[in-house]
Image: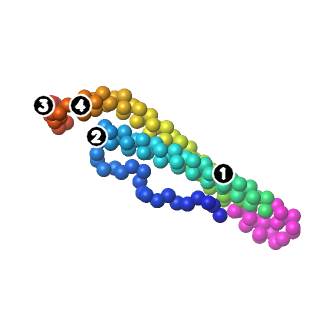
Amino acid sequence: MSDLAPRTGGAAAQSDGDNRYKAVQHKLKTLGQAMEAAEGELGTLLLGMQQNADRAGDLAVAIANAELDRKFVEMTNEVAVALGGAAVDVHRLHDAATEVSGLAHDARRTHARLYEGLDTVRSGRSERTPKPGFFAR
């Protein structure tokens, strides 16, 4: 059995419609960190699945060498193949988590580069800022 336990707590970052600069920065940071954590957990899962697939394959050979009924060898081989196939899919998921983590960090840096100055100006003044589109008329 695995030592992995399901994570609780729901979504990594709430999608609450708050699009202020600091809120978006926090959401992107939370997403990046959640994907990094998932990347680590998926790496552990992948290693365990690969080891279990290897063990099942070795067990199938041992069963065959013990001259047990052929159906047990075939069933054990099917388990090894299924675990190997699942490991391939977990590897793809691991790669996707790695990519999303990198993209979230890139998006956070780009967002900061584009909007940090504006946020500094807007946060530093005491007057309220007009709603978006006000000056477009």
Query: What separation in Å lies between label 3 and label 4 (alpha carbons)?
Result: 26 Å
Q: Is residue 59 above or below residue 45?
A: below
Q: Which corner quadrant holds the C terminus?
A: top left
- Closer-to-camera residue (40/76): 40
| Three-letter amino acid code of the residue under disc 3 | Arg
Question: Is mark 1 in CB contact (under 8 Å) with mark 3?
Answer: no
**Residue holding disc 1:** 47
Residue 109 magenta: no
- Badge 3 crowding class, 10 Å Cα cut-off, few under 14, some 14 to 19, many 20 or more, is few
Report the mark closest to the observer, 1 or 4: 4
Left or right of 19? Residue 75 is right
Q: Which residue is mark 4?
A: 124
Q: Are marks 2 and 1 in contact (CB under 8 Å)?
A: no
Residue picked out by circle 3: 137
Residue 20 numbered mark, or none: 2
Q: Badges 3 and 4: C-beta atoms under 8 Å apart?
A: no
Q: Residue at x 37, y 28 (%)?
A: 113
Q: Residue at x 34, y 41 (%)?
A: 24
The answer to whether residue 35 is left or right of residue 116 is right
**Badge 2, how many Cα within 10 Å: few under 14, some, many 20+?**
few
Q: Residues within 10 Å of mark 1 (few under 14, many from 20)?
A: some
Earlier along the polypeptide chain: callout 3 or callout 2? 2
Q: Which residues are magenta?
A: 60-79
- Residue 7: image location, x then y, percent: 50, 58
Lower sequence index among marks 1 and 3: 1
Residue at image point 82% right, 61% down: 61
Crowd rating for badge 4 (residues with CA inside 10 Å; few <14, some 14–19, many 20+) = few
Distance CA(mark 2)–CA(mark 4): 14 Å
